[in-house]
Amino acid sequence: MERLRRALRGTDRAESPALPVGEALHPLTLLLVVVLVVNDWLLKAQWRGSWLTGKLSDVAGLAFAPVVLTAAIGLVLHAAARLGVRVDPSLSARKLVAACAATALGFAAIKLAAPVRELFVGALGHGAAVDPDWSDLLCLPCVVVAWWIGRDELRRVPLGRAAAIHARGAAARPALADVARAGATRVDQLADAIDAWDVAAIDRILAA
């Protein structure tokens, strides 16, 4: 599993940072996407109106949507950084919490507010439908799965973080505080290497 995780995530380097989408390529994220696709395209066709297939879509969607959202934001910020904007495109604890909250609030609004639901269905396109079942709100705690996936990415030092710290001229230790809280090892060594911009040391620590 660890080899698969590394292969999917890619290798981050000080001078050639990987795209900041590690959380979206987590094996559990990809599994949840597969579950949603199989459920919506196959199982729902076999068992129309089934309570189980409806709840399975909600569970899978709530569990992976926040980290897909943070990865999408990361790609936009990565493009901005390439244009010279001094931003950090990597996943952060703040972005993760905000994405989880936004997903939960958006899900609740779609289920409870008819105007929001109509806008959402319209955005999905012809043939889309959302069942306004308040019991779907019982699935809201599944956003904790996304938080866990994101925390696992933070623990590994989010892709692009080292390069972003250097590009912004920020002090490394404060910029790595959420990484340290997530349980990453050798954070002090990484911070010292970033402050000194010791590319070989940074790459060695990130690879480990």
Image (cartoon, helix red, strand yellow):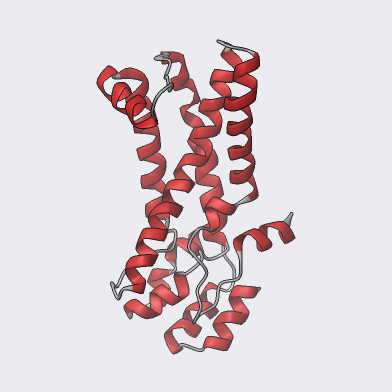
Q: Quadrant of residue 49?
A: top right
Residue 178 horizontal side relative to residue 77, left or right: right
Along the line of sight, which residue is nearer the eye, 144 or 19?
19
Q: At 37% across and 39% down in the image, what residue appears?
A: 101
Q: Residue furthest front?
A: 126
| Along the viewing direction, whichever of 134 and 125 lies nearer the viewer | 125
Quarter of the image where one finds residue 131: top left
Residue at point 55%, 81% (across, down): 202
Which residue occupies 42% across, 84% down?
A: 195
Judge whether 25 appears above or below 128 on screen. Answer: below
Image location of residue 88, percent across then percent down: 37, 67
Q: Is residue 160 above or below residue 95?
A: below
Image location of residue 6, percent across then percent down: 67, 63
- For the question of whether residue 88 can be seen, the reply is no
| Outermost residue toward the top in this view | 49
> In the displayed structure, would residue 132 be above or below residue 70?
above
Task: Identify the image quadrant of the N terminus.
Answer: bottom right
State the quadrant of the C terminus.
Answer: bottom right
Q: Where residue 52 sits in the image (x, y, percent)? A: 60, 16
- Above/below status of 101 relative to 107: below
- Expressed as whole percent of the image width and height from the top left, the position of residue 48 reads 58, 11
**At 58% across and 88% down in the image, what residue appears?**
200
Tell me how many marks there are: 0
Q: Nearer the viewer, residue 89 or 174?
A: 89
Report if residue 112 is visible in the image. Answer: yes
